[in-house]
Image: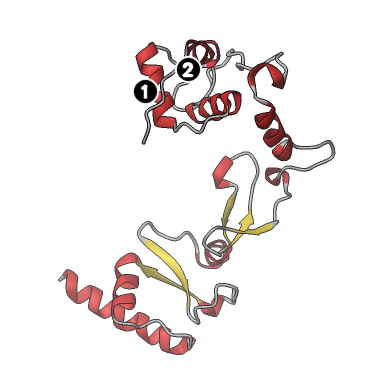
Amino acid sequence: MIRHKYLKIEDQFLIDNVKGITLKELTERFNNKFNLQLSESSIANRKAKLNIQSGIVGGQFIKGQIPFNEGKKWSEYMSPKGQANSRKTTFKKGNIPTNCKPIGSERIDKNGYILIKIQDGHLNKNWVRKHRYLYEQSHGKIPKGYKVIFADGDNRNFDLNNLIMVSNAEELIMNQRKLISENAEHTKVGVNIAKLLSKAKTR
């Protein structure tokens, strides 16, 4: 891999734009500006060599900070290619962001589970897996170290009789001993076997 040799104009860009911006965004802006594909670690190393810091604590902006691009045109800090890419993802007038969806909305996560929105204003806690939510509404909070599985293996079957709470240890035993079946009743028997084996193991 060829090591990038920073030019004075590139160093100056980092110096001028580092304040109030995350490493990820700084890297994206830098690459867009100079039509490069440098990694975040490369930019981080250059920041350290230049002895410059963003002024962001824990990835959050400090109150009163002015964004690096406030009052600037895209052409002042982005290449034409970068501007074109940004236009593709910029919200257009009238668009509603996904985080503005009403409570009760549903979507699918990257693992194929259905999420349901239960509240606003709590960032990543606004959405929870639907089967866990339904189970807790009926049986109370799921203890730490436990999870809810689908008895018939169908993660679209939200019938309460199809939702079973097991410990992480019990689920591990069920996977190891192939006690999970598409037949809900067989899986329920497998859960009982796993509970007995788990108890015996902890004695």
- Residue marked by disc 2: 54
Using the image as rendered, state which of residue 56 and residue 28 is in the foreground: 28
Q: How is the image coloured?
A: secondary structure
Using the image as rendered, state which of residue 155 and residue 34 is in the foreground: 34
Q: Residue 66 lies in what quarter of the image?
A: top right
Q: Residue 158 lies in what quarter of the image?
A: bottom right
61 relative to 6 in the view: left or right: right
Q: Where is residue 163 in the image (x, y as percent from the top left)?
A: 51, 74
Q: Where is residue 4 in the image (x, y as percent from the top left)?
A: 41, 25
Q: Where is residue 145 in the image (x, y as percent from the top left)?
A: 35, 59
Quadrant including the N terminus: top left
Local crowd at mark 2 within 10 Å, few (<14), some, or many (≥20)?
A: some
Q: Which residue lies furthest to the right in this view?
A: 94
> Does dot 2 land on a helix, a strand or a loop?
loop
Using the image as rendered, state which of residue 162 and residue 81 is in the foreground: 81
Q: What residue type is labelled 2?
A: Ser
- Circle 1 or circle 2, nearest the eye: 1
- Residue marked by disc 1: 45
Q: Are the two marked residues, 1 and 2, in contact with CB atoms closer than 8 angstroms?
A: no
121 relative to 146 in the view: left or right: right
Q: Where is residue 201 in the image (x, y as percent from the top left)?
A: 18, 73
Q: Which amino acid does label 1 sit on?
A: Asn
- Mark toward the start of the polypeptide (1 vs 2): 1
- Residue at screen point 46% across, 72% down: 149
- Residue at screen point 54% across, 22% down: 21
Quadrant including the C terminus: bottom left
> Does dot 1 land on a helix, a strand or a loop?
helix
Circle on res. 172:
none
Using the image as rendered, state which of residue 53 and residue 159 is in the foreground: 53
User: Could you tell me how many numbered marks the image carries?
Assistant: 2
